[in-house]
Image (cartoon, grey):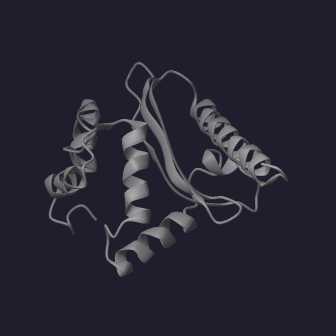
Amino acid sequence: LINFVGGIQNVNAFIKDLGIDQIQLIETEKSMEQDIRKSYNNWSTPLSVAQLLRKVYTEKVLSDEYFAFLEKAMLASASGKDKFRAGFPKEVEVGHKTGMSYRTLEGIRMCDADVGVIYMPGGEKCYLAVLVKDSKESDAENAKIMADIAKKVYEHYTENSAKAAAPGK
């Protein structure tokens, strides 16, 4: 996909043009495979990733065709069932993309992530990004951290929605 849009530089510039400056993408899967330390050259804050995703969903950032493709692919994602997906009730739809870096020779997972859109009851969407950096934990523990955060976000949302809908509120 990166080659389809003209290279990683074009992806990085596109994101910057959207007004999101806390994301840097300069390495490709190929360059990171050749030297895993180059993974650190690609970085972001979780907030910036969530803002990017929100822009894609709420602004006309992509053509209708490309947006439909992206949304369908994220909703159909089979990866990371132990990450965000594990934190939500089964009936909640989640469109997400997981990612995982290499482990260093010292056993450190440089990055483990899940980023997505939670289709909340009532039709609202929640944009969530969890990025775990330099983890010495097992992959299962990293996934549990993401699932626990997703669960807390969902519980907070549903509790506040119920309070807001209560009579007299």
Residue 129 vertical placement versus 142 (above, below): below
Give residue 107's position: percent from left, percent from top: 45, 23
Image quarter of residue 65: bottom left
Residue 79: name its quadrant: bottom right
Measured along the vertical axis of the image, is residue 34 above or below residue 66?
Answer: above
Question: Would residue 77 appear left or right of 56 to someone viewing this image?
Answer: right
Q: Residue at x 65, y 41 (%)?
A: 153
- Given residues 67 and 31, the one toward you in this image is 67
Residue at 57%, 32% in the rendered image: 142
Most foreground residue, 68 or 51: 51
Compare residues 8 and 139 and report the one nearer the observer: 8
Residue 169 percent location from the top left of the image:
77, 48
Q: Residue furthest top?
A: 106
Q: Pick the residue in front: 61 or 149.
A: 61
Residue beneath the point at 54% across and 62% down: 77
Q: How many marks?
A: 0
Which quadrant: the N terminus? Answer: bottom left
Q: Which residue: 24% across, 61% down?
A: 2
Residue 156 image offset from top left, x and y in percent: 70, 41
User: Left or right: where does residue 143 sit relative to residue 69?
Assistant: right
Image coordinates of residue 48 in percent, x first then y, are: 36, 42
Q: Residue furthest front?
A: 168
**Residue at the outermost bottom position:** 65
